[in-house]
Image: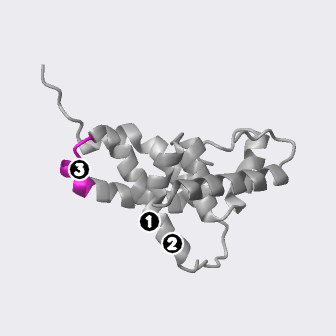
Amino acid sequence: MTVTEPTFSDFMAARWAPLFRTAYLLSGDQHEAEELLQSALARTCVKWSSIREKGAADAYVRRAMVHQMSSRWRRPRRELATDELPERGHGGGLDVRADHLALWEEVRRLPPRMRATLVLRYFEDLTVEATARELGTSVGSVKSQTHHALKRLRAALPDLELQP
C-alpha cells in the first residue's frame, strides 16, 4: 500500500485554525494575525515540494511566523489613527472566560519576545529546546524569558494560579 503525501491544500485546510491561533497569540491583533499567517503559508506553499517531512510543516510555518514577527519587533511600530474603531473580531478562542480575558490582557502587555516564548512553550506545547530553535535563541534565553514572563504575570494576576 502506498501512502500519498498530503497536498499543500490539504495541509492548509487541516491546520489553518491552530496556526491562526498561534499567529493571533504572537501578534495580538486579528488582522495582523491573518496577514502573518497568510505570508507564512505563502512561503510554505513555495517550499512545499522541498519539505521532506510533511508532518513537520506546522513547525515550518510557525518558524516563518516567528521570524517575520521578530523582524517587526526590531522596527518601530507605526500606528495609524482613524475615526472608526476596528471590528472586535474573535479573540482567537481566548475570550471565553473572564480569567482568560484578564490573563490575555496581561500576556499582551508582555514584551514581544516574552510573549512569543510563552505562546510557543504553553500554547503550542513545545519543549524548551524546540522553542529555542523556533526563536533562534539559546535554551537559557528561553528559560529566562519564560521565568521573567511568568513572574510578571503572577505579579499582575495574583489570584490566578500560573504553573511554570
- The residue identified by callout 3 is 48
- The residue identified by callout 1 is 68
Task: Residue at 84%, 53% (x, y): give it.
Answer: 155
**Residue lying furthest left:** 1
Distance between mark 1 and mark 3 Cα atoms: 19 Å
Distance between mark 1 and mark 2 Cα atoms: 7 Å
Circles 1 and 2, Cβ within 8 Å, touching? The answer is yes
Closer to the camera in the image, 56 or 76? 56
Q: Secondary structure at mark 2?
A: helix
161 lies left or right of 118 = right
Pick whichever of labels 1 and 3 is earlier in the sequence.
3
Distance between mark 2 and mark 3 Cα atoms: 25 Å
Q: Secondary structure at mark 1?
A: helix
| Amino acid on which the number 3 mark rests in the picture | Trp
Task: Residue at 72%, 50% (x, y): give it.
Answer: 150
Closer to the camera in the image, 139 or 87? 139
- Residue 82: where, in percent of width, then height? 64, 76
- Residue 136: where, in percent of width, then height? 45, 60
- Residue 8: where, in percent of width, then height? 26, 44
- The dot on residue 72 is 2
Magenta-colored stretch includes residue 140: no
